[in-house]
Image (cartoon, rainbow, N blue to C red):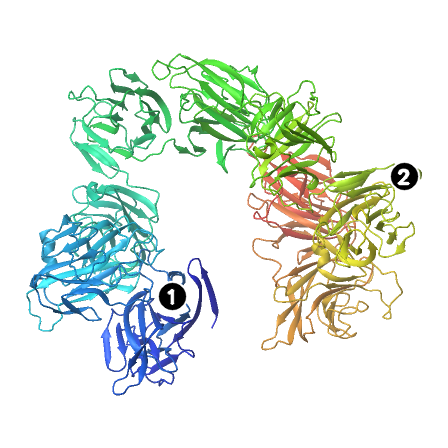
Amino acid sequence: APLVCVLKEGWGLGHVISSSFSSTTSAGDIGFIMCRQPLNEKLPYFEVEMSQVSDGGVVQVGLVWNGFPARKLPGMLQGSLAYNMCTGSLHVGAASCRPVSSPCVVGDVIGCRARLHYKQEVLQQGDSSKIEMVKVEFFRNGCLLGVEDVSLPPSGLFPAIGLVGQGTQVRFSRSITLSPETYFSSHPLPAGFVNFTPPPPVDLSWRCVKNAKVTESGEVSQLFSRSGSSTIIQGSLPFSMLDFFCEVHLQISLDKFTTFSIGVLPKVSSSTIMIPGESQNSVGFFPLLGFLMSNGVISSTIPDSIIGDIRALHDIGVGIHFNTAASSVQAGQGAETAEVFFTISQQQLSSIVVTLPPGGLYPTVVLDTDYKADGQALVTIDYPALWPNVSGLPYGFVRGSSGVMAFTKTILRNAESSSIHVVQAGFPLSPVHSYYEMTIRNIDGDKPQLAVGLASYWHPLDVLPGVGKDSVAFHTHDGAVYKPGVGRETVAPGNCNAWLKLGCGARFSAEGGTRGAEVFFTVNGQMVSQRLVQIPPLGLFPTIGMQGFTGFIYLSPFAPDPFPDLVFSTKWKLLTNIQLFGQHISSKLPKKLGLAQLASAPPSSTVTYFTVSLPQPVNKSTGKVFIGFSNSDDTPFSGKQLPTHRSCVLDVVSGTIVWCDPHLHSDDIGSTADGRVLGCGIWKVNDNTMLLFFTLNNQVIHCTPWVGISGSMVRTLCLIDCSIRVCVDACASWPPTSRIGKGWGRSSNLVMVNSKICHAQLQAASSKCPVGFAQAAFSLIPDRPYFEVEITSQDPKKVIAVGLASREYPVNSWIGTQDNSVAYYSDTGKLYAGSSIGKDFGPRLAKGDTVGCGVTFPPNYYTASRKGQPAEVFFTVNGAVVGRKKITFPHGGLFPTICLDCTTSIVPSFHSKFPPTQGFVGKDWAIAYSICQIGQLICHRGGSSSISMGGIPRAFCQATAKLTPEQPYFEIEIVNCSNTSTLSVGMGIRQAAHATSLEQDLLLYISTGEIIIRSGSLKSTQMSQKYFVGDIIGCSVIHGPRLSVEFHRNGVKVSTVVLPEGQLKTQPLFPVLSLSHPGDAVIPRLCRPLPKWDPSTLFGWLRTERVSIRNNVIEYAGNSQPESREVGAAQMSQLLARPGVAYYELEVLDAGAACTIGIGAASATNSLSRMPGWDRDSIGYHGDDGCIFRASGAGESFGPVWKRQDVIGLGIRSVSGSVEPGSEVQVYFTRNGQELGHVTINVPSTGLFPTIGMHGIGEKVKVNISMSGQCCNPDPGRLAWRALCGVALRRDHSGRPVLEYCPRQHKTPPSGYRFGVAIAQQPLSQNMQYFEVQLCQYGRMKGIVIGVAPRNYSVEMACGWGSDSIGYHTDNGQLYNQSGTGQVFGPIPKACSTVGCGVSVVPNSTKHCFVFFTYNGTDIGRVRAAIPDGGFYPSITLTSAGDRVAVSFQEAFKPRVSQGEHQMVGLLRIVNCSYSNQLLHYSGSSGTDPAIALFAVALHRESNYFCANVVNLKDTVVVGVATQDFSVKDIPGRSSVSAAYDITNGQIDAVYNADKCFQFRVPRCLPGDMVGCGIEMSESKTVQGYIFFTRNGMVVQKIELTSVFDDLYPIVGIRSVENCSTLFMVWSDVQMPTPNHF
């Protein structure tokens, strides 16, 4: 059986072994299975899942001894025990059988565990011998069913299963650990059943028993002498996440008890009797008295109608729901509060939330009776007990009509449709379990009706929920919600189909259930209704009703809440003359004012906001709607108002604001009755001032300060006219979240992408672009006076405008160009203030800049009238104020507004105060002088150059953040500086706030190479390397025994400075940089962790002569005259050493005329005017002659000469274990990843530095370095081959690696042939079973061999000729199998076709395999072969010059053509050519007759592009499009209507737009090029569309079509017998060329 390892966090490692068994016996016979291994301490548990059971079938699961007879069921003989899944009984030997549960259903899982850690020795009856007893536990779906003590045989207890009945099937699994994670991973169960794990190993006896005798099974059989004291029984363990329910089964009627109390108590001693509910930290239920008591106080009473039912029943339970996840086994760990609940016949009766004491709460029963039991059991106490019980109904449901039953543990079946059927859950909804869900699996019936909802306790089983008292339900037949006394409201279309998912949930107030619950319904996951209902005395129980319905329903009684972020919202404080229906309210009586007030918002809320929406227009003659705030519980229009009462409401119909405040007067803002959503809010500015605002469609329309308010303000609504129904959202958020982010109101042509606000046409290239407009939802106020915009993307020719405008400003106009607006424009730096003419105002802006806008408010802003009052608006760039402008406050205030052009994006932010930044730099810089920031650049602000006396530039800036041990490093990249400029970078203590020069202690690295240290009176200078444009200068603080600073140049440490005593050593250090001349610019990268240098991309150069270096590319820059040409060289700044640079390599980008390039290593004192290896202490390998030079001008033959694209490497290996000066090392060289050889030399005194020399015009190389001694950038094409003999690896025009025949220079081998042989690096295996070869080009002999060979196959023989090799030869189509004689095998492949080879498994053999071959994606045959040692290696043999192939390795063979990829397309018409296998061949009688292929599928929007791969090119070949009626006698592009790319002559011919002829010059094509043609639709009225042509994926020409755009079909024309093109269609799921490729 397979072994599956499951690793879950917090639960360790669990191993599960699974197998499935099914009974094959006839009726009455027994099927028996027993494990080979007994249960042990590592594998103590196994389980069996019932998959299928036949009628009359039996499944018994248990433990037996070794040698148990196979024709007996487990549990039927002494010493064995088993659980019968079909009856729910536990069998212990032949003598004992007792029911422990209801019968199992399909899907139930029974587990069995032997507690072998807890063995017990007991005396055997009749003699003195001892036997070992162990406890065996049985579980059902993770819940404990029972515990039995059994004897442990010497051989152990073996898991066994007995099956009866043909077709009975179970799944068996065995695991090391039984834990929630391993259980839930394979057994998904309803959420909420937190007891689905076995309890820990504990003694289940009762810890505290007084005045009673309790057996192990929980039977209370006798009361002892009663002297006024009651009997108390308390469990040995507190309630926990695993054991959370205890149930008492009465064996006598309840009225025979004088005292009966059940509940929870802290741990009590055996000498005291405490009644649950009467003491602290306890809860008790007194069924004789009909009340619940908590902490000595009666918390609730049970109605008399239910009390009568209770006294007639016999099962009373108590349990605890813990409010946290099951992270702890014991109570009190991880849970502060819990919900104690009580049940009657396993239906929840009531619950109380309690605080858990430190030791937890124990189940406790107290009772007393005068009844003489005579040994009869009075009660049976079951702890821990299973809850809810599975008794004929799915999980969670305990009451149901006849005819309704459980099909499985989660599926309900209704078999009768004639009457009403109802099922009800055993628990009410609560904050812990607040939602349930069901899905109709299948349905039958003429008019099926399903009702899903909530009802009171003991709802009648013949009345649909929503119809009976105290119930509410959604009915599927009409899509309406029913509630007695309210009627019905249609909320969704009527629908009762299969797979319809319905849900019902409730939200509860944090204050408890006295205010009711907010019930909601969902259909297929979408909320369709939400309403407030009153909670009945015992709660709202999930209830489902069915009528005219038969079928199956999936039930999820503890489904997760689909809307966890929503909270109880409709907290109504006062309702007068108001009818409530969910979130809708309306007035009850006509022409009478209705008042509704929401409960007060939390005191901590800064903004209190609510909205109302009007689903229907208000009757303006009789109706009125007022929204606002009041501190009184009376209407704002009442004459009972006290002097301290304050209120303000908006008349929605007239737009009048009505104040009840002597200091404020009514205001008219215009009618808002036609608005979709109106809102009202209070913004708490300070303890004395509030800002009252009204919104229309999430846009502020009025804002007024409210000063001197006493008492809390309550959200208030007033309604007149009973026909008005208003929807109230009491938890609306403010500021609102719009489609472009939080806080924005009106917007147009803008979208939000990755937290950036972008123009909706961000990729558009059109010059006519609609303005992108956005306005904030609120105006600026004194407590929020400023906002900023960071420019994240901008075309310099495009515009970003930032400013302020009135709330009525048109969305299609640029801000600042009309009245009541002012704006700053990024492209010109001009200010526009109510005019289309701007004035110069500030700098132009670029990507990375931050522009801000704010208002300086007058002191009396909140108390004075603001309309017409002047306002001073200021603008900032990168935190510095650039100017101010006075404008007049418009009506409603000034709203932040932005306008964007195409290709621009920003990140906005709102601030409560203006950031106190100085200078023209961003927030990252605390101090700046003569410095400005443009995007990422830090630049000199201009003016004359300035150098202080100490050589430090005067223009400087200092960072805001200090360097820390976690972020000790920063760097700058030098972008621009002149020859006379002086730059410096370093660190220092904090400079003065308004400093105009660097006065305090500092440490600077200057571009002249000096390092200046200034600490107090100490001033010193050190010398280091100079730095220039393009260099990256880093600076880091090294926190160690001696505090020091390191400077880096291009990732190489150039100097270390130990900080002297003084402030530099004791004060925080901040990054500093300074510039000297206008135009100086750097890019800083501030405080960050110390980087780990990547030597392959970041290294420096120690010395250079007559070469130019950029991005690690070295190009010869010496004299162009051959007679005076000098050597150019470059030497790296890193030593060849370990650790350090152990290997470096160069790629020949251009070999020039003779490839006079050398790679080597030399000392730091060698001349760079000579090639590496010519001088003492140097060595070099030269590419023009393949010689190696060692301290001499005379070379030694070493390796091949170099060519373009070759990769040559040099590495160092230690001989003595050291690479220090004087030690002996091996210097080795590589070519294309293969080592050529090595030379042993001594390391000179200065060490060996990588050195590259070149001596010819045009020579260019790219350099990489490695610290591992391995190839830096291995070419996958080269590394795929372990042997390339007589074969060169090249790349075609698309960069694809190809193998070409390259004849060897040595003598002809004995075979008489000079073969080119390539053998792969890896053999064919399970991960690489197949490889394919595209025959790009044939040579003279047209003989290419594809096959497999052993690892060390001779390179002197073609594949298939030698031992253990098999090859398919393309010159004759024969297969050669370890022989020089071939057999006819397959077709003779043509050029451009594809041949593949792979291996497949021979059944029941590990020494043989099948070798198969394919041709153009079709299997053509296979042979059986013995696998050589090491396996079969892909092998290719090339036989003549011109042979060229491309190879690809694949995991397995796959057909070439598949849906959605390259598809073969039918032909509409074809002349003088043939088309097969996607190849188009010329078949005309002479070279003058054109061959035309017109394809049958027209180009359209979903398939708008096709392409052709040019394989051979001897004469004219054209690729293009034409209409369906195009004459195939003409060449495409020469007659109407057609357009074609003449790839031979490099021109495009077209006849279109009323038969006009056009011609365009474009590049010619070569064999291997990919030529494409496509169409593009146009939205313009003047242009119908475009035809575009591509070469190798790049657009070469685009043609406008102004006439009617007919259907255009792909067409290809050729005129030569040797021309051949590969064609295939490319559909729309492939990335197509775009206009950006021009």
In the image, 1508: left or right of 300?
right
Q: Answer whether residue 547 is visible to the viewer in this image.
A: no
Q: Which structural element holds mark 1? A: loop
Q: Amino acid at mark 2?
A: Arg
Please report contact status of discs 1 and 2: CB closer than 8 Å, yes or no: no
Percent x, y for residue 1017?
65, 26
| Foreground: disc 1 or disc 2 | 1
Percent x, y for residue 416?
22, 62
Marks 1/2: CA distance? 82 Å
Question: In front: 415, or 627?
Answer: 627
In the image, 24: left or right of 247?
right
Residue at numbered disc 2: 1125
Percent x, y for residue 494?
28, 47
Q: State which tag comes first along the sequence, 1 or 2.
A: 1
Question: In front: 1014, or 1077?
Answer: 1014
The total of numbered circles placed on residues is 2
Question: In front: 1496, or 1429?
Answer: 1429
Residue at numbered disc 1: 178
Outermost residue, right direction?
1123
Q: Answer whether residue 917 is visible to the viewer in this image.
A: yes
Asked if residue 1240 is positioned above or below residue 1494 in the image, the reply reads: below
Label 2: how many residues lie within 10 Å, few (<14), some (14-19) or many (20+)? few
Percent x, y for residue 1186?
86, 53
